[in-house]
Image (cartoon, rainbow, N blue to C red):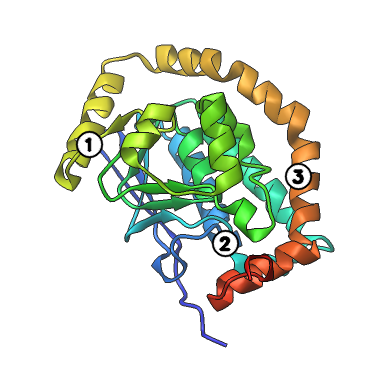
Amino acid sequence: MTEQPTGPRVAVETSGGVARIALDSPHNRNALSDQLVRELRAALAAAEADPGVRTVVLTHTGGTFCAGADLTEASSGPVGDPARARADQLIDLLRAIVALDKPVVGRIDGHVRAGGMGLVAACDVVVAGPGSTFALTESRLGLAPSVISLTVVPRLTSRAATESFLTGDKFDAARALQIGLVSRAVDRSDEVDAAVAEFVASFAACSPQGLRESKALLNHHLLETFAADRERLAEQSSRLFASEEAREGMAAFLQRRPPRWTS
């Protein structure tokens, strides 16, 4: 078994009223491991509690923003139903981003897959660079984008959601802008930070109360959906992760071979 690296999975820098939170787990392409999710929740809570922070920027190190669930942990955990625990954990993380009382800017210039799409969709505004690619790959593994549908579905047009959920096909930043997943797509990587800075400057000109109340207004119905649909979506996610078909899909992915239904 390959020894896993130690140390933090999330890096945080705070200056000039901005908390920059970077997914920093390159060994597994910033997958949503238990450790990364816990550290990300803690970083978000700290930023919310800091009166000097006006804006949160959620970004990444390496060429992948987030690869989705850490499939090596899919069947492990401290409780009897680890898949359900992971689903609840991800729901809580997505809700924390949506409910945060400060604007969250997604800064993406890398690959986004599966659960990572939920993080992108939870952000208030998103800048995507030319290195960005996006895909909801769950259907190819015998799964469904159950939990992340809470944030992804409200962002996309109906036809785009259907196409993305059912095909698992990859698309670029221009397409992500067209269907509503991101706020701005830039042509060069050196333009990403400038675009983020524009959003940060705009938020700095607004009052904290105005931003807080405007965000609450925008996300009121979404937060109601979290409460209403949580049990159904967590149950579906847990059931699918435990299924024989999904176990084959995840094993095929980890072993870099086609799953048996494609042969």
Callout count:
3
Q: Quadrant of the N terminus?
A: bottom right
**Which is nearer the N-term, disc 3 or disc 2?**
2
Q: Disc 3 vs disc 1: which is toward the camera?
A: 1
Where does residue 78 sit, x and y in percent of width and height?
75, 66
Q: Quadrant of the C terminus?
A: bottom right
Residue under label 1:
186
Residue 197, quarter of picture: top left
Residue under the image location 56 percent in, 62 percent down: 35
Q: In the rendered view, tell whether residue 174 sits above or below residue 198.
A: below
Residue 148, quarter of picture: top right
**Which is nearer the N-term, disc 1 or disc 2?**
2
Residue under label 2:
33
Q: Secondary structure under badge 1?
A: loop
Depth check: 89 or 38 in front? 89
Inspect the image, locate mark 2, and give the three-letter code of the amino acid beneath it: Ser
Residue 56: tell me if it is visible. Answer: no
Measured in 3D between alpha carbons, the distance from the residue under mark 3 to the one under mark 1, in whole angstroms, is 35 Å
Measured in 3D between alpha carbons, the distance from the residue under mark 1 to the one under mark 2, in whole angstroms, is 30 Å
Where does residue 253 sit, x and y in percent of width and height?
57, 69
Depth check: 169 or 134 in front? 169
Residue 202: tell me if it is visible. Answer: yes
